[in-house]
Amino acid sequence: MAAAASALATLGKRTVAIAAFLVLWEVAPRIGLVDRTFLVPFSEAVKALIELAKNGQLWDNTQASLVRSLAGFGIAIAAGVPLGLLIGWYRPVAEIFGPLLELFRNTAALALLPVFILLLGIGETSKIAIVVYACTWPILLNTVSAVRSVDPVLVKSARSMALSAPRLFAKVILPASVPTIFTGIRLAGSGSILVLIAAEMVGAKAGLGYLVNTSQQNFAIPDMYAAIIAISVIGLAFNQLLVALERRLTRWRPAAGG
């Protein structure tokens, strides 16, 4: 009972700010605090969202965005984690790639969007490529940091037991690095949605970013806010999925305060 009450109290604290925001969103246009032409009440945005779901526009555009986002996100993980492990563990690799990392880590993905479009066109390739670029850096940098911050005592203890380099890496370095690596993956997950939405506003014919842009241009304001709500819900669900996966893979860690 005590645990259930504590969980309910925590849930209430987490939702009170969201509830207050939604109430303000609903009330402000109705009482004239903001122009209702440009900010429709929340209930009208929800009605538009339901209508978009009924006529299929929501699902078609969501599918287009998810395919691009997940493809780029998966490629970034497949490239960023192994490269980060190599850079973090082998000093010669770090010396080779270090200057390049410093050059590109400070270049915003959206600043390079015109370059990707010029080189790869306005089709699917450029949109997936920009997601790969945006997601790779948080994954790569967190992986490098994770490997370099492994407790030296653990490494020395493993070496004193005559573990080979591959077993040392598999049994000590990699498990100790997982929490920090997942921090980068979660950052990349949110970034994959945000960068893609911006990319879809340029030259796309489908996707949630395209839906937001066309709705704004056609002055279909409720549809625009409906698409924004859909983007927020997808981003939240994606993050929660990654959190659940992280907890499953790091069950060996002691609970905080335990």
Image: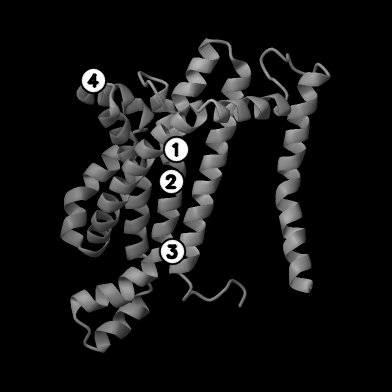
Q: Which residue is mark 2?
A: 189
- Going from N to C along the chain, the mark reached first, 4 or 1, is 4
**Residue contact between numbered discs 3 and 4, judged by CB atoms under 8 Å:** no
How many other residues sit within 10 Å of disc 3, few (<14), some (14-19) or many (≥20)?
some
Q: Give the Cα distance between marks 3 and 2.
A: 15 Å
Residue for point 28% across, 21% down: 122
**Residue 163 falls in which quadrant of the image?**
bottom left
- From the image, state whether disc 3 or disc 2 is nearer to you: 2
- In-front residue for pair 153/70: 70
Say whether disc 4 or disc 2 marks the residue closer to the N-terminus. Answer: 4
Secondary structure of residue under mark 4: helix
Q: Which residue is mark 1?
A: 193
Q: Amino acid at mark 3?
A: Pro
Q: Amino acid at mark 4?
A: Leu
In the visual, does 126 lie left or right of 17? left
Above or below, comparing residue 132 to residue 176 in the picture: above
* Proximity of marks 1 and 2: CB atoms separated by less than 8 Å: yes
Is residue 5 shown above or below 225? below
Gap between marks 3 and 4 measured at Cα: 38 Å
On screen, residue 194 versus residue 9, left or right, reads: left
- Gap in angstroms between the C-alphas marked 4 and 1: 22 Å
Place residue 90 in its image quadrant: bottom left
> Percent from the top left, x then y, of residue 34?
75, 17
In primary-sequence order, the first of circles 3 and 4 is 4
